[in-house]
């Protein structure tokens, strides 16, 4: 526990500590569980890998992927879930699966596949934080990866067409947002008064969607109509991430 | 399907009652069908039994290719063809039968979340075991998948399917997982299901819903399918309330109706 924990992740903007969903999930969980995390934001220098971000480094270990990082933090006694009952723990897993299946494709699409958004916002943002000449290659590769993931999990074989899938994934995402809003109701967090893993995941997926300014915004519009989810994101930002705005 | 086409299908569906000759198509039961497809097919059969809708199961070697979405099972009702549990539930709802109408909004959200959990973890683990674990692939999957076809088609189709599944695994981040990690995920999923079920007869207390059908389909198939080793079914057997749950649904919806869908003893 005395070993310093360092997290490499993508940086922030538009009032968020990070605009990358997975990095944000880990940062939020660390704040909720009280883990002392030193955040290394990836910038223009060559130092640090960009492959599997976010990455947690300690003296002896390197852990990647949010689920594994959260497990590691729990083993180090930084547990945000100890007050949850068994059923609530089970619900957490189920809702995370719901987020990954229904919401994530649309978030990936909004950020990486929708051409107006990608070329005017996402690509310049990421390219400015990656040193030349990698800045020419890496954003394209991330975009390709997002498209492949969407098509392989939602497309119909043998001809994977994006058009047919687009309408469906946005519909699923809106339904997912509605379900989350219904579940949250008027509580401050999903399981009572203290935030837990599920809150970290929901915050990580929703906050970039909520805050980043995109030209093509249909999902953002829908989210803004669900006022309890917006209040949820703002509360977490104000209580746990007091940063100056207009950062990036 | 596009939104307009789907609305049209719902309209048409609503006008006709459920016919007597509705059929469900799946692959050949004895020699061809694989674990994941069997689970999906059983889930749909269980769902239709729970809704009290008659269905006849027909086995065809090319069921996968007949299906409009490429996935089995699919049902042929009147002059419409619908595949996969999600669309089938909606189709049945348009005809006026639903198992989840009595749930409130929060419960419906929970039900959908748990169904995604099963799809996300159990189904993906089944696919991983079938297509990415070399032992199972060599001994069982390759032989079964290509069995109705002559050489060399049987090998080509099997390799093609394996390549497709491996691509998908890589895209969702399961490409680097070891078998042990996959089994741990299965255990986590079963633990969550067991905790949610508790001591209730069904997931939403007295009445079964599509979630019960889906969970039954997967767990029953895992428990009763012979694989190269028993690790997968051992994970499920650790949870006695899940075993009781499967037994209860099997007794109530399959044996009692006289439809013996291989009522194998759950040991």
Image: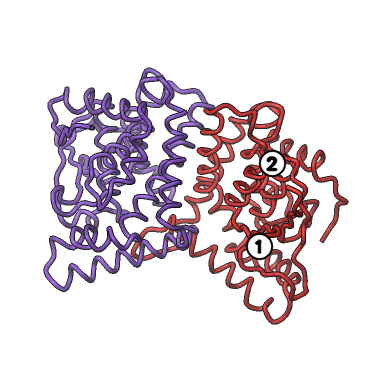
* Element class at badge 2: loop
Determine crowd level at label 1: few under 14, some 14-19, many 20+ residues with C-alpha closer than 10 A. some
Q: Position of residue B245 (x, y in %)?
A: 32, 26
Q: Position of residue A102 (x, y in %)?
A: 51, 46
Q: CA distance from mark 2 to mark 1?
A: 37 Å
Dot 2 or dot 1: first in sequence order is: 2
* Element class at badge 1: helix
Q: Is residue A222 visible?
A: no
Chain bearing tag 1 is A
Q: Compared to B17, does B138 lie above or below?
A: below
Q: Colour of chain B?
A: purple
Nearer the viewer's eye, disc 2 or disc 1? 2
Q: Compared to B28, does B149 lie above or below?
A: below
Q: Position of residue B111 (x, y in %)?
A: 46, 32
Q: Looking at this view, is A214 or B124 the one in front?
A: B124
- A70 vs B226, left or right, is right
Q: Quadrant of residue B189?
A: top left
Q: Looking at this view, is B85 or B181 the one in front?
A: B181
Q: Looking at this view, is B146 or A224 the one in front?
A: B146
* Residue shown at 66% from the left, 60% from the top: A60
Q: Quadrant of residue A4?
A: bottom right
**Residue B263 disc label:** none
Q: Residue furthest right?
A: A244
**Residue A117 disc label:** 1
Determine crowd level at label 2: few under 14, some 14-19, many 20+ residues with C-alpha closer than 10 A. many
Q: Colour of chain A?
A: red
* Residue shown at 59% from the left, 62% from the top: A114
* Residue shown at 14% from the left, 53% from the top: B31
Instruction: Say which residue label 2 marks.
Output: A78
Same subunit, labels 2 and 1: the answer reads yes
Chain bearing tag 2 is A
Q: Compared to A132, does A29 lie above or below?
A: above
């Amino acid at each position: 526990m005395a070993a310093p924990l360092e997290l490499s992740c993508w940086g922030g903007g538009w009032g968020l500590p990070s605009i990358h969903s997975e990095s944000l999930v880990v940062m939020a969980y660390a704040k909720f569980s009280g883990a002392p995390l030193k955040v290394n934001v990836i910038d223009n220098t060559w130092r640090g890998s960009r492959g599997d971000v976010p990455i947690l480094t300690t003296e002896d270990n390197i852990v990647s992927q949010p689920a594994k990082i959260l497990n590691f933090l729990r083993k180090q006694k930084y547990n945000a879930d100890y007050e949850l009952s068994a059923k609530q723990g089970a619900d957490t897993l189920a809702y995370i699966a719901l987020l990954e299946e229904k919401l994530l494709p649309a978030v990936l699409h909004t950020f990486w596949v929708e051409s107006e958004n990608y070329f005017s916002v996402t690509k310049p943002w990421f390219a400015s934080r990656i040193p030349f000449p990698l800045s020419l290659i890496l954003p394209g590769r991330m975009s390709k990866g997002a498209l492949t993931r969407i098509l392989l999990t939602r497309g119909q074989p043998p001809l994977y067409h994006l058009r047919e899938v687009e309408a469906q994934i946005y519909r699923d995402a809106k339904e997912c947002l509605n379900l989350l809003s219904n579940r949250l109701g008027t509580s401050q967090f999903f399981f009572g008064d203290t935030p837990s893993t599920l809150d970290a995941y929901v915050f990580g997926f929703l906050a970039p969607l909520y805050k980043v300014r995109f030209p093509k915004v249909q999902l953002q519009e829908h989210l803004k109509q669900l006022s309890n989810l917006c209040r949820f994101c703002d509360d977490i930002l104000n209580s746990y991430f007091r940063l100056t705005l207009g950062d990036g | 399907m596009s939104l307009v086409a789907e609305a049209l299908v719902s309209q048409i569906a609503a006008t006709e009652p459920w016919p007597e000759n509705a059929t469900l198509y799946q692959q050949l039961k004895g020699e061809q069908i694989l674990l994941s497809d069997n689970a999906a097919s059983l889930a749909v059969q269980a769902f239709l039994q729970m809704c009290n809708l008659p269905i006849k199961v027909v086995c065809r070697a090319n069921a996968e290719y007949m299906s409009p979405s490429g996935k089995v099972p699919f049902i042929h009702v009147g002059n419409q063809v619908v595949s996969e549990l999600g669309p089938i539930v909606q189709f049945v709802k348009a005809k006026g039968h639903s198992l989840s109408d009595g749930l409130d909004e929060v419960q419906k959200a929970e039900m959908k979340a748990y169904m995604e959990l099963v799809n996300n973890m159990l189904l993906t683990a089944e696919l991983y075991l079938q297509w990415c674990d070399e032992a199972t692939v060599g001994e069982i999957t390759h032989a079964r998948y290509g069995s109705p076809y002559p050489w060399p088609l049987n090998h080509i189709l099997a390799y093609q399917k394996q390549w497709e599944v491996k691509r998908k695994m890589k895209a969702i981040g399961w490409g680097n997982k070891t078998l042990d990690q996959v089994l741990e995920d299965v255990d986590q999923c079963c633990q969550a299901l067991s905790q949610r079920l508790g001591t209730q007869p069904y997931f939403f207390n007295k009445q079964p819903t599509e979630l019960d059908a889906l969970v039954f389909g997967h767990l029953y198939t895992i428990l009763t399918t012979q694989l190269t080793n028993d690790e997968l079914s051992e994970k499920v057997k650790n949870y006695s309330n899940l075993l009781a749950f499967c037994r209860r649904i099997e007794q109530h919806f399959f044996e009692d109706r006289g439809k013996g869908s291989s009522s194998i003893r759950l040991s």
